[in-house]
Image (cartoon, rainbow, N blue to C red):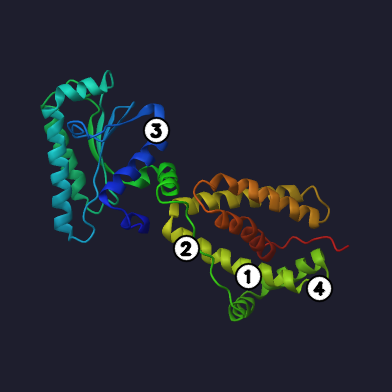
Amino acid sequence: MVTYVEKLSPKEWEAFCAIMLRYHYKAKNFWEVPDEDKGDLGLEFFTVDGTLFQCYYPDLNIDMAGYRTKIQKKIREDLKKLKKNETAIAKLLDDIVVNQWVLIIPELKSKDLIAYCNKKKKEVLKQELPYIDAATFQVKIETPSSFPEGELFAKGVYGKAIDIPLAEVTEKDKIAWQEGHSEFASNITRKSNSLIGQKSNEFQDRVVTKYIQIEKFLDQLREDHPDLHELVEDSARAQLEKMKDDSLFQEDLDKQFVQGVIQSNSAAFAKHSKYMSDSNMQSLSFGYISKWLAECYMDFRDD
């Protein structure tokens, strides 16, 4: 289970889903059905493409049998409302034709629920509801992973920006890293001396520290927010290719080239700023420079 979900209440889960889906479908294509006036008719959101949504936050501490039973009950009872509220729903949808009913839950843990949805779909179709397209209609369960960009946006808006604390790096940590990564340490020393001169010890120390921190940061990001981790890694890979291409037009690499890479990194990672704290964004920009200094064998010009 993704850790941010465990901290949400059922009402917060509904708000999270609203933010996620509105971002995914864009505001003009998305409607939220208020429940203050005579209830929500058994649907919380609907979209211009003909999707009806309900959200459900099951008890995370129950066993598998209880989990299946509660979700099946939710599906069964809400689908009954499609017939019960037939006239009101048709009026609400206007000329939108429904092709799927979707229950959004934090995590799908049982394949039996997929079979149950197929069974309930057939029951709904027998009712011949006028606003449902019988040829395409489905009953489905989805999770936030089905809406990755929307999920990341909702995390940033509702759960506040992702802010992973940087690990404390001790002298012992740095010595152990240098002993275990002698080639990388040699690269850092050589490039630092070329950039700054023989008095580059402080810069080398900072690069090693940032390298260790970015590695631990990325491990935590991968574990807690795998979708965002993949986006960041995609940006980093694109930046590495750009740096390699740019280096072809330089006889030797120098401080000006590095400054250009730093600026380019900042611009490339800026697209993720809506999901992450300022400190995490800064960590990415310099952290990947540290990785490049350590792992890449291209050299700088010695003035």
Mark-to-mark CA distance, 1 and 3: 42 Å
The residue tagged 4 is 199
Q: Is residue 54 above or below residue 265?
A: above
Q: Where is residue 121 in the image (x, y as percent from the top left)?
A: 17, 34
Which of marks 3 and 2 precedes in the sequence? 3
Residue type highlighted by circle 4: Lys
Q: Position of residue 105 (x, y in %)?
A: 27, 47
Structural crowding at the residue carrying mark 3, measured as other residues with C-alpha within 10 Å and reported as few (<14), some (14–19) or many (≥20) = some
Residue type highlighted by circle 1: Thr
Q: Is residue 171 above or below residue 83?
A: below
The residue tagged 2 is 220
Which of marks 3 and 1 precedes in the sequence? 3
For the point 64% across and 46% down, the residue is 267
Structural crowding at the residue carrying mark 1, measured as other residues with C-alpha within 10 Å and reported as few (<14), some (14–19) or many (≥20) = many
The residue tagged 3 is 25
Q: Is residue 102 left or right of residue 241?
A: left
> Residue 61, located in which quarter of the rendered image?
bottom left
Mark-to-mark CA distance, 2 and 3: 29 Å
